[in-house]
Amino acid sequence: MRTLLVAERKGSELRRVTLELAAKARELGDVTVVEIAGERYSPLPFVSALAKKVESEKPDLVLLGATLNGRDLGARLAARLGRGYAADVTDLRATGNALEVSKPMYAGKVRAKLRVDLPAVVSVRPGAIPLRGAAEAPRIERIDADASAEKLTFVKLAATASAAKRVSLSEARVVVSGGRGLKGPENWHLVEQLADALGGAVGASRAVTDAGWRPNEEQVGQTGKTVTPDLYVALGISGAIQHLAGMTSSKVIVAVNKDPDADIFKIADYGVVADVFEFVPAFTEAVKKARAS
Amino acid sequence: MKILIPLKQVPDSTVRVKVAPDGRSVVTEGITWSISPYDEYAIEMALERKDADPSTVVAVVAVGPARSRDALRQALAMGCDEASLVVADAAAPPVVARALAKVVGEAKPDLVLCGKQASDDDQGFVGPALAELLGWPHVATITKVVPADGGFELWREVEGGHEVWKAPTPALATVHKSEKEPRYPSLPGIMKAKKKEIPERPLSALGLDDTGPTWTVLSMEPPPARGGGKILKDGDAKQIAEQLATALRDEAKVL
């Protein structure tokens, strides 16, 4: 199988998902890695440049990370080229002239296996394909975004006040989320300090983002982000079915909640029935100590 | 100004989705159906434009099974002006996009708002594919639309903030969230919606080419059961915190 992998960076660093996919693509056969160079992602210039590359190389499979931009680019590319398509898959393998992919459906409440005709475009969920050992940096060919295809005008970037220098939520290996049990935005330092001690990203339940305590981009769950970190820590989150859908595939789940009957404990690997205000500072200290020794 | 929203009817987000005995679909008997959540945000976003400018016409369309008319009726009750249905029992997403392109060609909206993905297959294909078929630019995963000179300013949520893009008319955007939570239908809204006609036609009436690549569900299963977790309760907060940190480091190996 010949794969064209679309690399993505965050700042100057390659995204982890690009390394994950490079390893997977090598398992499947030959791989060419391309990066589309443009000031920022925009669908038409990126699709136009990528479609030309795909038409000249004719790979069986175009692989992208199922990131914010990767999912959008993949969908429009598949439509332009009339290719088979699957988004946000968690595994894939070749079966003759088709691909078999696994993917969550119904917001994570169901795992489905799909057959996708080749040639295809597939986006893969960050963190779904484990990186074994040190990731080998792939050789990357740069292609220029096709500025002549642009029909939009970029106006400005409006930064979120709380935009922290933390890792991105969708790709983080550790996520610490806070819920209504935190009682108010003024207590978020508890979530942030624990996230910093763990080197993780900060998330929130929908109740919290709806109340305006935290920005929407931090929402984990059915209408927010789906995350699959190695460690998910839920602080003061009861575990509504919509929240569980967004984090139930995490490798290890820790729940801290005052209510022993909270649904979150049904899926947690480690549960602590405690007041978050008392427990979280102690846990943050314990994590620092455990990581230092 | 006319805004068109293609919508999909899906199992309500509170439904505990179960895999059917055939192992490749989900149980649909007796479940509650709703407008897919991101489509609902798109409707709310359009209705907020209509609140600001009452001359705005908000239309919804579904390409789906006959039961989708309930979702269209719901959209009318929320305050949408027009609804129509293209009846198709199991149209592949590329065919849905082609059907919608025909509908857009007839309805000639200034703006098409699509939910960023339907909460059943979670593919997120139809919005960008529709823009591609129409030859329109699109902006993905927006949270706000503001009419601007000759077009629209579209706010797109990215890591750390919002990108603001200007699109000429007509434009398409996929919607991540609306500024406010989707409104509930009002009683007068429900009464008015009951009287409105929802024109229906079969997919075949659009004379579409339904060839092309497919993706087929081979099997479905529930996510692996979790549980059998430990509740740590021996000692005070500090002692439990230390046990937990040690377990995460030495047992779960995630620290």
Image (cartoon, coloured by chain):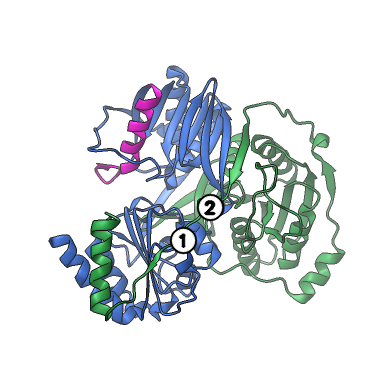
Chain colours: A blue, B green
Three-letter amino acid code at the position of disc 1: Gly
**Quadrant of the rendering where the N terminus of chain B is positioned:** bottom right
Residue A269, percent across and down? 39, 62
Does residue B101 appear in the picture of this structure? yes
Q: Position of residue A222 (x, y in %)?
A: 53, 59
Left or right of A86 on screen, residue B40 = right
- Judging by the rendered image, the residue that carries numbered circle 1 is B227
Kindly identify which numbered label has been placed on residue B33. Answer: none
Image quarter of residue A21: top left
Kindly indicate whether the residues beneath marks 2 and 1 are on one polypeptide chain.
no
As drawn, A54 above or below B42? above
Which residue: 81% across, 65% down?
B193
Pick the residue in front: A92 or A31: A92
How many numbered tags mark residues here?
Answer: 2
The type of residue carrying mark 2 is: Gly
State whether the magenta stretch is mostly helix, strand or loop: helix
Q: Position of residue A198 (x, y in %)?
A: 25, 61
Which of the labelled discs sits on residue A108, or is there none?
2
